[in-house]
Image (cartoon, rainbow, N blue to C red):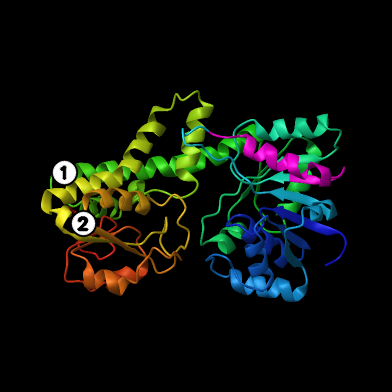
Amino acid sequence: MPTALDVVVVGGCGHVGLPLSLAFARAGQTVAAYDTNPTACSLVNAGEMPFLEPEAPEVLAKVLADGTFIATTDASVVARARTVIVVVGTPVDEHLNPDPNAVTDAVSELAEHLLDGQLLVLRSTIYPGLTRLIDQLLRNSGKKIDVAFCPERIAEGKAFTELYELPQVVSGCSDSAVARATELFSALTESIVVVTPEEAELVKLFTNTWRYIKFAAANQFYTIANDFNLDFERIRHAIRFDYPRAADMPAAGFAAGPCLFKDTMQLAAFNNNNFTLGHASMMVNEGLPLYVVSRIERKFDLSSMTVGILGMAFKAESDDPRSSLSYKLRRILRFKAKEVLCTDPYVKSPDLSPIEELIERCDLLIVGTPHATYKDLQSSCPVVDIWNVLGRGVTI
């Protein structure tokens, strides 16, 4: 690895940072993924992905062989980069309030390694106003650094498609920052959309919140239909069949993950908690596991049953359990049922069981995550499947 680096990605071994690091390295940039997780760095340097991402293993092997990529826990690597990309986002606390200090703290910890003339790109979701705040903090410290915000909008599992095919939104606190960020991401995509930092911050929040609201609408429709013993999936099929204006109506299911709920709450906080639609969406989506259990209780005596949950990842064909509502479902069922067993073909956890054990021991199965492997499920016990993975309908 040469002394000078084109790009250092801070948080570079995570779900957002690693695919981005590998994409830039494959494009011919010299890249270092800086991460505080030594286990992840060791895996990556050994050519192993720490999580599932299609195409990533092949790309990782290539860039390691080419010598254009390395992972490191040494923060001083930041001083060697022309561009520093920070993928640390803004979390929400236990009271659903955003913590903007997470990003400013991360940048402050890097400050001793940041050098005049560098381009600093904020990448993950941030609370509106943080881009200019960080720019001002760096200026107040005497640093002459171009600050840009270029939000990440890829879906897990589609990184090496969407990094190249989706337009990249670019914003910056100066013309120089915009020009440099545009040049940087032009290595990945030809389509660049330039907006102001405030607009870019809301682009990210509005995008995720819009998806969350759509899922909430579908889940509310599902509960209405189900309460009248009608199959929402049959209704949805009729609505969408050769009818383009409703083609994007999603199926019912557990709307979760590390971004959608969190970003909806950030947007609510930004608007002084005056976001009725967002809060209503949260109540619908977060309330779905309890709704499912309450409907099951009308048909079965859960206190005498062993219940199995199929799938603990937050989305299909993923090994990422972050914010998965399957865990909320498990918590509710542990209070209601005699015993609860869980399985997942991708999530690695000592408290999960092989699917064969669930099929053998459970009196009732619930599809928590619509992994494709469950489509061929053979079970003699009842299966609750609000995702319609089995194609038997979604009525409980």
Q: Nearer the viewer, residue 339 or 295?
A: 339
Residue in the image at 76% along x and 50% along y? 84
Q: Position of residue 100 (x, y in %)?
A: 61, 34
Answer above or below: position of 185 versus 2: above
Q: Is residue 74 magenta?
A: no
Residue in the image at 63% along x and 69% along y? 43
Residue type, numbered disc 2: Lys
Q: Position of residue 319 (x, y in %)?
A: 47, 63
Answer above or below: position of 350 versus 143: below
Q: Position of residue 351 (x, y in %)?
A: 39, 63
Q: Which residue has dot 2 on it?
A: 338
Residue 27 visible to an observer of this rendering: no
Q: Is residue 108 magenta?
A: yes
Snapshot quadrant of residue 234: bottom left
Mark 1 to mark 2 CA distance (whole Å): 26 Å
Q: Which quadrant of the rendered structure holds the N terminus?
A: bottom right
Q: Position of residue 182 (x, y in %)?
A: 73, 48
Q: Nearer the viewer, mark 1 or mark 2?
A: 2
Are the residues at dot 1 and dot 2 in contact (C-beta closer than 8 Å)?
Answer: no
User: Which circle marks residue 18 in the picture?
Assistant: none
Q: Nearer the viewer, residue 48 or 249?
A: 48
Q: Which residue has dot 1 on it?
A: 227
Residue in the image at 78% along x and 51% along y? 83
For the record, the magenta segment spans: 98-120
SS at circle 1: helix
Residue 128 visible to an observer of this rendering: yes
Residue type, numbered disc 1: Asp
Snapshot quadrant of residue 393: bottom left
